[in-house]
Image: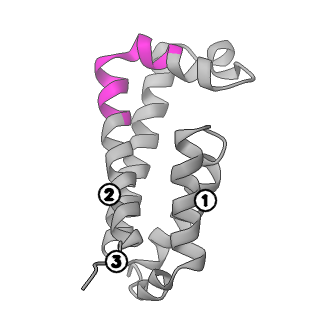
Amino acid sequence: MEEKINFRKVTAFVMMLVGILTIISAIFMPETYTKLMTSIEPTKKIATFLNIQQVTLLAIITGIIYFIDGYLVNDRYKEGMYISVVLGILFLFAFPIGTIIGLITIYTMLFSKDRYEFTREIKL
């Protein structure tokens, strides 16, 4: 019997991996990370308005959001599904790898049968 790909687990893994890589690169290579971000961003607003420390802090916060979202998706929380859709839309603009990640994320959260697995909710 052929095993099907569980896109929910793939999405969770990718989000956690992107979060970890973002945090590590921001902490250990802040200058390189800043140059990378300015080369990816077409308007160059990051380089204009933020210095290296601010970009590093922004990257760490973004990495934490990615990681938490990966955890929520892996544990089937509805909130993780909503956050993933937003992040998937943002990923679409990071051509070409981000576009692929964004398409897989949006497909998984909105169109695949895995979306019915998201039944848990965060209780405060």
Amino acid, disc 3: Lys
- From the image, tell me which residue sits under label 3: 4
Residue closest to the far left: 1
Q: Is residue 23 magenta?
A: yes
Q: Quadrant of residue 120?
A: bottom left
Q: Which mark is residue 13?
A: 2
Amino acid, disc 1: Val
| Residue 117 x, y percent position in the rendering | 41, 86
| Residue 73 x, y percent position in the rendering | 39, 69
Query: Looking at the picture, does residue 85 appear above or below residue 122?
Result: above
Is disc 3 surrounded by few (<14), some (14 to 19) or many (20+) residues within 10 Å? Answer: few
Q: Which residue lies at the image location 47% right of the left edge and 88% below the top edge? A: 116
- Span shown in magenta: 22-35
Q: Which of marks 3 and 2 is in front?
A: 3
Q: Distance between the residues labelled 1 and 3?
A: 26 Å
- From the image, tell me which residue sits under label 1: 86
Q: Say if mark 3 contacts mark 2, CB within 8 Å.
A: no
Amino acid, disc 2: Phe
Q: Is mark 1 on a helix, strand or loop?
A: helix
Q: Is tag 2's residue or tag 1's residue first in the polypeptide sequence?
A: 2
Query: Looking at the picture, does residue 21 appear above or below residue 48?
Result: below
Residue closest to the far right: 43
Q: Is tag 3's residue or tag 2's residue first in the polypeptide sequence?
A: 3
